[in-house]
Image: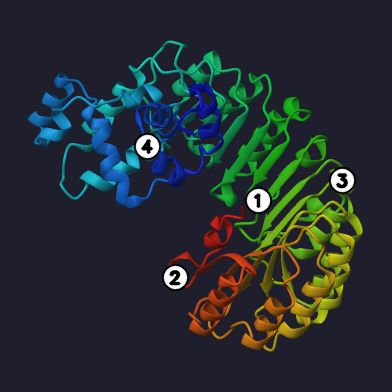
Amino acid sequence: MSKLNRDVLYLIFEELQDDKKTLYSCLLTNKIYCEIIIPILWRNPWYQLHPGNEKSLLNVIISHLSNGSKNKLRNQGLNFSDTLNQKPLFDYISYCKHLNLIAIFKIVDNVYSILRKPIPMIKAEIITLFINSNTKFTHLYIPRMHNCLIPRTNHLFSGLVFLNCSTATDKDVLSLLKRICQSIKELDLTIEKSKNNPAGIAGIVRLIEGQKKLIKVNFNVINVKNSELSCKVLENSLVKHANTIQHFRITKPPVTKILSSFVNLKCLELDNFFIEKWNCLEDLSLPLLQNLRASRVPINALTNLIKNTDGHLTEIKIDYVSHNNKIENKNIIRAIHQNCPNLKYLKLTIRNDNILELEKLLIICKHLNGLVILIDNTDVLFGWDNLFKILINSSPIGLFKFKFWLDSPNRTIDLESLRFFFDNWKKRPSMLLQIIQMMRNENIDNLIKKYKAEGIVAKYDNDYDYDHWNGSSLDNFEWV
């Protein structure tokens, strides 16, 4: 690999841009590797940033401050170590394409709030550092209720493709962005009370209408009682982009019939944070839909939506919703195997009563390669034997990625049933396996170690930490 030319190495490391662990392991190989990897890592230094590394990142940023800025902060009682006074080996700031002011402010607050240092001044100096770097940013994250020091020139944000802001964002900032940004493809918008900042809402509308090709939109509503007017105005502003929007996420049922206008929608994310009805899904037809991700959305509404797709769904992920009875659970499993022949990934609650319906799904959905089974907490005596027999006998040849999520501290997988599952998987590809449960079961861990040594299990992950038992661990487990 050391003989590969620089361009080939760059292409290889670009493919690994989201795999920080691998990039860090290659970083110290030689000078060429380092010079290629550092700009990739610093393109978005806030990505997957562990809280324990926040101070180190902030120190690197501060080391780029001019002597004048450092002297200003010293006069306010902020002392710098000799390391921070040294010139960095790389101009890290110039590599940054994601100006994440939300992350910067959070890090400054976390590091300096206890010390009672001049936090507003530190933030101002850091913003000045970034906006004076002559870097063309592709991503901008604006904190709520903050009048950012965005320069009145267009070279920094003229190529912006991603914007995170809110209806409380300062109207002058929105006006500036509307004037210089027409290439935004992804908008991540937090919708607040309309009466608080009508000028902000009008600014967002003008910004949306000024884009040339908006592809991905996230409407994050944080106050459902006072958001109807805002949502109506903003949803109507998306009509112009109805043909280009392919990915849409919303945290409450839309006020208008905007969903039906998204004729080319490929990914729909519904997060029913306020636990409302979703009657708008009953007659909704999205023929090109490929990915459906829903959280807390009633099962009957999702069942109707799946029935009105046109066979293109490849991913269905349904979280945090009770299947109140076996009929509801049966109906959605049936809707999936009758309407989703190209399904590759499924995350769904399975009740004891409907194991045979799951078998039909495995037989019909021949492209399935990832299955996440959530065990309903009403099934006190879940039939692990039946589940594993069906997985052994009916799984399509490409299915070898499994996750089992047990949502009760008193629930665990039957050890002998699991042993039977592994013993009868020997002629299939080695499986990737994750088990999420609230209580540690060392017998299961030891059993899986045995079958991992035999090659039946290629990769195994578990997480018994209650702080992570919210589903994030389940989603972050890498299927490779």
- Label 1 – label 2 distance at C-alpha: 30 Å
Mark 1: which secondary structure?
loop
Q: Position of residue 257 (x, y in %)?
A: 79, 41
Query: Sequence-wise, which precedes: disc 2 or disc 3?
Result: 3
Which residue in the structure is indicated by mark 4?
A: 29
Q: Amino acid at mark 4?
A: Thr
Is 393 left, or right, of 93 in this rendering? Answer: right
Residue at x-position 52% and y-position 77% = 445
Query: Sequence-wise, which precedes: disc 1 or disc 2?
Result: 1
The vertical placement of 311 against 318, above or below, is above
Residue 252 is labelled as 1
Residue at x-position 56% and y-position 77% = 450
Residue at x-position 79% and y-position 28% = 243
Query: Sequence-wise, which precedes: disc 2 or disc 4?
Result: 4
- Label 2 – label 3 distance at C-alpha: 41 Å
Task: Rate crowding at label 2 as few (under 14), some (14 to 19) or many (20 or more) other CA atoms within 10 Å.
Answer: some
Which residue in the structure is indicated by mark 2?
A: 465
Task: Rate crowding at label 3 as few (under 14), some (14 to 19) or many (20 or more) other CA atoms within 10 Å.
Answer: many
Quick check: can you spot residue 339?
A: yes
Pointers 4 and 1 in contact (C-beta within 8 Å): no
Quick check: can you spot residue 199?
A: no
Mark 3: which secondary structure?
loop
Depth-wise, is mark 2 or mark 4 nearer the camera? 4
Q: Of residues 251 and 159, which is closer to you in this image? A: 159
Task: Rate crowding at label 1 as few (under 14), some (14 to 19) or many (20 or more) other CA atoms within 10 Å.
Answer: many
Q: Position of residue 446 (x, y in %)?
A: 51, 80
Q: Amino acid at mark 1?
A: Lys
Name which quarter of the figure residue 143 lies in: top left
Mark 4: which secondary structure?
loop
